[in-house]
Image: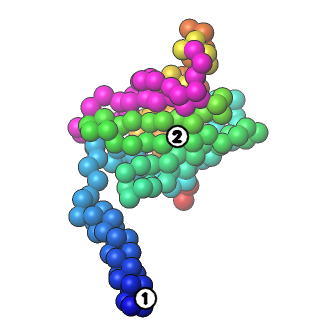
Amino acid sequence: METRFRMVTVVAAATCLSLPAAAQMKHAPQTSKGFQQIVALAGNWEGQTPDGKAVGLSYQVVSNGTAVLERLSMQGEGEMVTLYTSDGQRVAVTHYCSSGNQPQMSTGPTTGDAKELSFDFVRATNLASPEDGHMHHLTLTLEDKAHIGQAWTWMDHGKAHVATFKFTRKA
């Protein structure tokens, strides 16, 4: 009797574990055209700041193709991570900033190929006051398959500071 109970338990567990994988295969993720363009950035990139510091950038498609993880590291500074996701016809980002807050930004609807994706501030977590320093805007310029640009706008007490980067895809 005990052996039979164990066998039923093992079969039930195996069935439950296989269901999520089967469900994922039946339901392909719905993504916007803008998000698909970000997926195409997967790989490693190199660039520099306007003052000549080396900057590394990588994009990795994660979570069954429903998110893209960006890692940005500057010479002499810590790494920052940004997560891109599709939100209907929009693309949403959450930027995990080295300043300790997490701004969330979104594009407008993207239905065709775009040369530029503009992300506007929606809200932030761990931001004590809207006046405190935080990333407020991101412009991602898609020049061609081997060249992209980023312009990050830092907002602090009503003053905007823009940092621009140019990247080339690593071979």
Local secondary structure at mark 2: strand
Q: What range of the chain is rendered magenta? A: 101-129
Picture coordinates of residue 126, whole percent (x, y):
58, 27
Callout 1 crowding tier (Cα within 10 Å): few <14, some 14–19, many ≥20: few
Amino acid type of the residue tagged 2 in the rendering? Thr
Picture coordinates of residue 146, whole percent (x, y):
46, 49
Name the quadrant of the N terminus. Answer: bottom left
Tell me: residue 79, above or below residue 1: above
Q: Which residue is mark 1?
A: 2
Would you say residue 164 is visible in this rendering? no
The numbered mark, 1 or 2, whose residue comes first in the sequence reads 1
Local secondary structure at mark 1: helix
Q: Quadrant of residue 11?
A: bottom left
Q: Quadrant of residue 140?
A: top left
Amino acid type of the residue tagged 1 in the rendering? Glu
Q: Is 110 inside the magenta-drawn segment? A: yes
Q: Which residue is drawn at the image coordinates 48% and 36% (left, top)? A: 94
Name the quadrant of the C terminus. Answer: bottom right
Q: Which residue is mark 2?
A: 82
Q: Which residue is drawn at the image coordinates 52% and 46% (left, top)? A: 70
